[in-house]
Image (spheres, grey):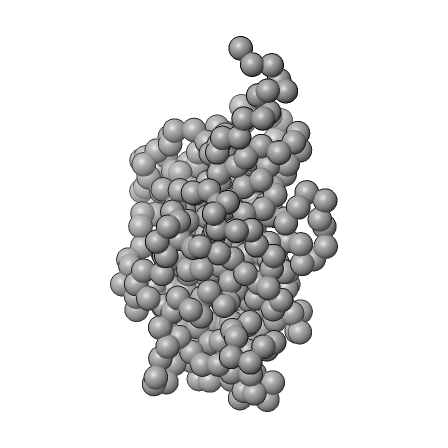
Amino acid sequence: MLGNTERRRIVLPITYVVNVPVTDVWDSPESRGEHNRLTQALLGDPVLAEEKNNFWLKVQVPDGYRGYVQRAHLVPASAPCSSLKGTVITAQTQIQLVEEEAPYHRQITAYLGTKLQLAQGTGLGTRDYHYTVYLPDGKTGLIGQDSVAVGKPSRHLAQVAERAQRLALCFIEAPYLWGGITCAGVDCSGLVYATYRCAGLLLPRDADQQYLSSQPVAGPPAPGDLVFFATEEPDVASHVGLYLGQERFLHASSRLGGVVITSLNSPFYRRHLLGWHRCRANCRRPGSAAGFESAEGEVSRREQEARSDWIEVPPVGS
């Protein structure tokens, strides 16, 4: 039998699940600067981790990023309790925990795009307004029926784009947060990633990759198309928004402090416009179950590790 010191030398990918509403993924355990946040992961997201110390795990999350997460925010993955899946389709909602011995019911927030396991047979009929939810740590809770879409959404691109446009409006007035993917704080590519993920299509996490993986549109843009801008280097996508129609786009702006609707005729954005793209039916790249080979920043490129060091992550919702 190996001693504790020898055990710590064994590095094996271990599957965990996020057990908090949202967790930050940092480039190192010591980092707390704004641009040290690489991305975020949501409640129920699967991650693969290599244990580093008592307080942090180095993980790869579903969007492809690899970084450090607080160990207290994760629980070991277990077998699914139900085959019925649901996705949160509001900016945020509350899951009311069911605890027999608690003097009152506690709540946990679930953000847009959170994947849930739902109990079979709940949420049915005119008097049952809630689904029973199985949480990663084994607890159960109740979530409002109108906050959840059940089953797999259609993958027809026109319907996906329409859903993404509608879901993106949930983010209006959300504050800007580098690396964020929720209404509590979001960056430009995180807004696009989160809304399309919720709509049923997994895109790359960052603006430059979203640009490369999508299809240029020669004609006028359609609602749901991605609008790209080169705000740093010429011809390099560093900012992205979601086209709404009537020459307007929705985006998370660091300059304006949050999620706003802006005219394409605004002098700054007209000057830096790269063009508009349409999402492809399959944006996943080969070689990664999460879908992407690398993850780079939207305004200044985020530091990344070599692809050869990465570990595989199960697809979201698997």
Image position of 262 (left or right of 289): right
Image position of 34 (left or right of 102): right
244 lies above or below 51: below
Q: Position of residue 179 (x, y in %)?
A: 59, 57
Q: Position of residue 133 (x, y in %)?
A: 43, 36
Q: Is residue 318 visible?
A: yes
268 lies above or below 232: below
In percent of the image, x 60 and y 59: which residue is there? Answer: 302
Foreground pick, 83 / 203: 203
- Most extreme residue toward the top is 1
Q: Position of residue 117 (x, y in %)?
A: 40, 38
- Count of residue discs: 0
Q: Quadrant of the C terminus?
A: top left
In percent of the image, x 55 and y 56: which residue is there? Answer: 181
Q: Is residue 141 visible?
A: no
Foreground pick, 123 / 53: 53
Residue 103: image quadrant is top right
Residue 282: image quadrant is bottom left
In percent of the image, x 54 and y 47: which residue is there? Answer: 66
In percent of the image, x 50 and y 45: which residue is there? Answer: 309
Foreground pick, 59 / 159: 59
Q: Position of residue 51 (x, y in %)?
A: 58, 32
